[in-house]
Amino acid sequence: MTLCTWLAILLLQSGDIHENPGPVSTSSTESDVLSSFRYHLSLVHLNVQSVRNKLDLLFTELNEFDILAFSETWLNDSVSSEDLLLLSFHKPERKDRTFDSHGGVMLYVKSNLHYKRRYDLELNRVENIWIELRLENNKRVLIGLFYRAPNSNTLYNNDIEDSISLAVDTDINDIIVTGDFNYDAFNTNTNRKILSICQQFNMEQIIEESTHFTESSQSLIDLIFVSNKNTIIKSGVGEHILDQEQRYHVPVFCLFKFRKPKQQCFQRTIWEYNRGDYVKLRNDFNSFQWEECFDFNISKYADNVSNQILIISKYNIPNKDIYVRPLDAPWITNTIRSNIRRRKRLYRKAKLTQSNMHWVKFKQLRNQIVSQIKEAKAIYYSKLSDKLKQESLSSKDWWKILKSFISPTQTTSIPPLQNQNTQEIVFSEDQKANLLNEYFLNQTYIDNSDSNVPDLGPQTTSTVINDLLLTASETEDILKSLKVDKASGPDGISNKILREAAKELSFPLTNLFNQSLSCCKVPASWKEAHVTAIFKKR
């Protein structure tokens, strides 16, 4: 028997030999999970051991999650919740320990989610928070956050179970419980407490790796209980993100199949007006054959003129289109984002190899990122401070910059709204706009069915306007009086452009205005506007 024949028989007998053996790539799986974060509900818990001076770091590391649950916040009444706001999150829900400066729990909910605090499920003696989420298709989810101190007595343990029991007694099927319970799942004695909760309330504890590390030990005490394990896409333990070398916790997280409203990114054109070539801009406007834009349909005529103004403007004024992500803190740089990705890769490598060299590299980069975040925020506010000192700054820009100091986490997005007639929660931008429009329309309705039209008396004038024509000089005067610090409308044409080329644009715009008056029609685009609903506190 030849060697080749023998090898062929061996391969046939083996049955499980692959053509290209080697490690299976996880890039596709990781990409799928990251994509799921955009559309599905996610939660993370971390024992932070004092939260106040770590918010910038926590936000940078964990802002992709929808629910941020923190235990051992070490807060008290002297710290206002207004000082704890995070960009793109609702005002935090918190429950501080009252008898000393430790303990406490706090929970953040992403601003695009609708929820309410369930005080009826919370016991005064227990450090816990309950919220009820309302998701798409009227899906209801209960989330509970707990902290149990290591020296808690049997009465406190029973109170935790009583609080969970109240949640189970509601008509809500999907219940999630997380927190630092100080029950070590690796310890036979304390694991009985965990099993007791699971059996009593028909729940499962899904975290399987160590979450708490000391100089000489590690334990699994940060837990996540779920009422239905089939709703989970992925769960696990994250890397150590805080600047703590000894006695620290790591995050525990869970990604669920519950769909959530997508947080919208929007496109914006940035113009660098100070670098524009306005001489060439005026020449291009002046030389263009505006008659080519004419159309008997006044709406098309107006759109043609607007589009041509934008085309010529973009050719002569530097500009770029950017996507604004609502999660971004203004001081977070691409370097920081890149280093965070590097650190994640180093963590996975160190965890796989357990090499001391890899762990050292991971810790060095982690500490470097902590310093970079602090430095980037300091530089950002230093630049804002320098801008405030500029004598050439307009009063409007001065107040705008000052506002970023006073309320740096203010968001302009509108959260999910509740229809008061149907009690339905609306999430999409179109639904929210229609609901607000319907509400404002109802406020302006006047029932005048029983009113009498007053007698205006005999007509006292015979003057009739037969023709109404505008002149180019009138249009030019109006364009020159426009305020350049006003925002552009839906057509994207700024007052800066109209004012800089007032003379050159006065002729095509006058012809457009006169055509509109002649046909007694207003272009459809002129009826569009950016309308902002401003919430007034009751």
Image (cartoon, rainbow, N blue to C red):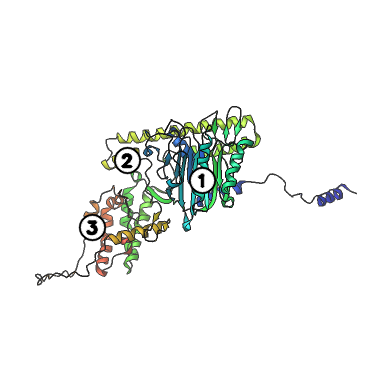
Name the one closer to the observer, 225 or 306: 225
Image label count = 3
Q: Is residue 82 visible?
A: yes
Residue 164 has which mark? 1
Query: Residue placed farthest to the front in the image?
Result: 155
Q: Sequence order check: which comes first, mark 2 or mark 1?
A: 1
Q: Residues within 10 Å of mark 2 (few under 14, many from 20)?
A: few
Name the one closer to the observer, 37 or 333: 37
| x and y, in percent, of residue 21 in the image | 72, 46
Q: Circle 3 is placed at which residue position?
A: 475
Query: Residue placed farthest to the right in the image?
Result: 1
Instruction: Give, as a three-letter code, the residue at label 2.
Output: Lys
Query: Residue placed farthest to the top in the image?
Result: 215
Q: Residues within 10 Å of mark 1 (few under 14, many from 20)?
A: many
Element marked by disc 1 = helix
Q: Circle 2 is placed at which residue position?
A: 403
Element marked by disc 3 = helix
Q: Is residue 209 visible?
A: no
The answer to whether residue 522 is above or below residue 34 is below
Element marked by disc 2 = helix
| x and y, in percent, of residue 416 in the image | 41, 53
Asked where in the image residue 53 lies, by quadrant, the reply is top left
* Comparing labels 1 and 3, the label whose residue is closer to the camera: 1
| x and y, in percent, of residue 345 in the image | 58, 38
Q: Sequence order check: which comes first, mark 1 or mark 3?
A: 1
Q: Sequence order check: which comes first, mark 3 or mark 2?
A: 2
Instruction: Give, as a three-letter code, the residue at label 1.
Output: Ile
Locate residue 412 relative to residue 202 in the image: left or right: left
* Comparing labels 2 and 1, the label whose residue is closer to the camera: 1
| Real-space CA distance between mark 3 and mark 2, rounded to the nearest whole angstrom | 36 Å
